[in-house]
Amino acid sequence: MAQRNKLKFIILGLLSEKELTGYDITKAFDSDIGEFWSANHSQIYPLLKRLEDDQLISHRLTITGEKLEKKVYSITDQGAKELNQWIGEPTPALSATKDEFILKLYFIRKNNDPRLAPMLTEQLNLHKNKLIHLQQQMEKKFHNQSDKNNFGHFLILQHAIQRENGYTNWLIETIQGLKSK
Amino acid sequence: MAQRNKLKFIILGLLSEKELTGYDITKAFDSDIGEFWSANHSQIYPLLKRLEDDQLISHRLTITGEKLEKKVYSITDQGAKELNQWIGEPTPALSATKDEFILKLYFIRKNNDPRLAPMLTEQLNLHKNKLIHLQQQMEKKFHNQSDKNNFGHFLILQHAIQRENGYTNWLIETIQGLKSK
DNA sequence: GCCAGCATGTAACTCGTTACATGATTAA
DNA sequence: TTAATCATGTAACGAGTTACATGCTGGC
């Protein structure tokens, strides 16, 4: 066995809301779910086939235009059952963060290393942009208010915003600290 | 090509400080570097061999007791060069966070879902413990003060503490919010 | 003598990325 | 008509996990 397949549950979770094609699922990683997870279509299509073999999902064919076939997938009762079981079971492992910038920082020993300032500034820009993007999503989707019918999505956006806020503040303070040396 | 091998640079980074055996490197993931990265010995030993083939590291044999052989690895000039090149080059990608708890939360739609409170409480305990552990590490290694000769390690500990602090605060506030409904 | 920990490896498997490959639809 | 996007797949490879496998050392 290798690591627990979480993409499986993402697909089941997306299909639990409405039926989707493989292409729709792929696109979901460019927006909403892409804020905190990634996947490529080359991983999604074979998995859809496997989930259908396992009877967790099923599909129907539709034709767009003259002959463009789409496979529209839906979740089965068994699939919904497995999804809810996964959500309900404990999530005991705090996996490593695996932030490449943090890793590089770990190997910088001297506080006067000339690479520090440009590295910190580069990250500050990235995280600032991410923060702005998340705040725009929050405003667009929830008007900055909790939504009782999409509560989980609201919570994780809120969480991501506070995380990026903390990250940028730490970067700003660290850059400030470097200057006043 | 698959994803960029970061373990390679972790090994080079660890060896840039002092010579180590594969076992020492494996153990490093139980303590210091384990705060933010993970790896198994089954991944480390073959990679050590590969890095030696590429002449980025070299080893000498030592005998402990009667016949226990250890391979003590050191970094080569070429290895040090590649390590520093990696540290110095841009780190433009903000990879997805891939936090399984956050993923589950995304698929909880109703704010009165009975699974919410126990899920949040479970995570609060995990992140509280992590925070305490990190604070102890900070006290033990740096006496809560910046160290100009191990500056990167100090910074990432500081960063991890602020991150876990933010995470626990968000969890506490969310749990509070659930109760006052 | 025994057991925890030291020490090093391989095998089998799944996950995940990049690249290759093809064709249809739609709107400018 | 042509380019962007829709739509679905496969191939090759490297990363990462779990399990299998073996033997030594040091302290009680």
Image: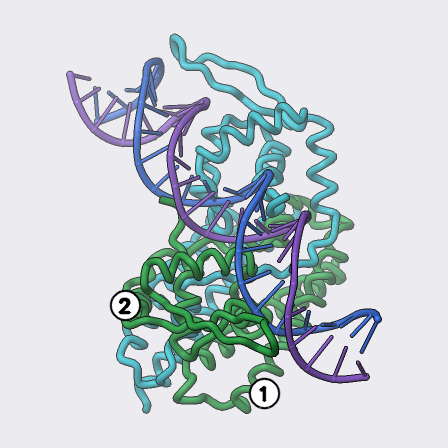
Chain colours: A cyan, B green, C blue, D purple
- Percent x, y of residue D24: 64, 70
Q: Nearer the viewer, mark 1 or mark 2?
A: 2
Residue A145 versus residue B30: which sits nearer the camera? B30
Find disc 2 in the rendering and name its residue: B78
Q: For this rendering, which residue is in front, B177 or B63?
A: B63
At label 2, counting other C-alpha atoms closer than 10 Å, the crowd grade (few under 14, some 14-19, many 20 or more) is few
- Whether tag 1 and tag 2 are in contact, CB under 8 A, the answer is no
Q: Is residue D11 left or right of residue A149?
A: left
Q: Position of residue B181 (x, y in %)?
A: 74, 57
- State left or right for residue D19 relative to residue B58: right
Question: Numbered disc 1: what chain?
Answer: B
Picture quadrant of residue A12: top right
Q: Residue at left 51%, top 67%?
A: B22
Q: Residue at x 46, y 64 (%)?
A: A164
Image quadrant containing the N terminus of chain A: top right
The amino acid type of the residue labelled 2 equals Gln
Q: Residues within 10 Å of mark 1 (few under 14, many from 20)?
A: few
Residue at left 37%, top 77%? A108
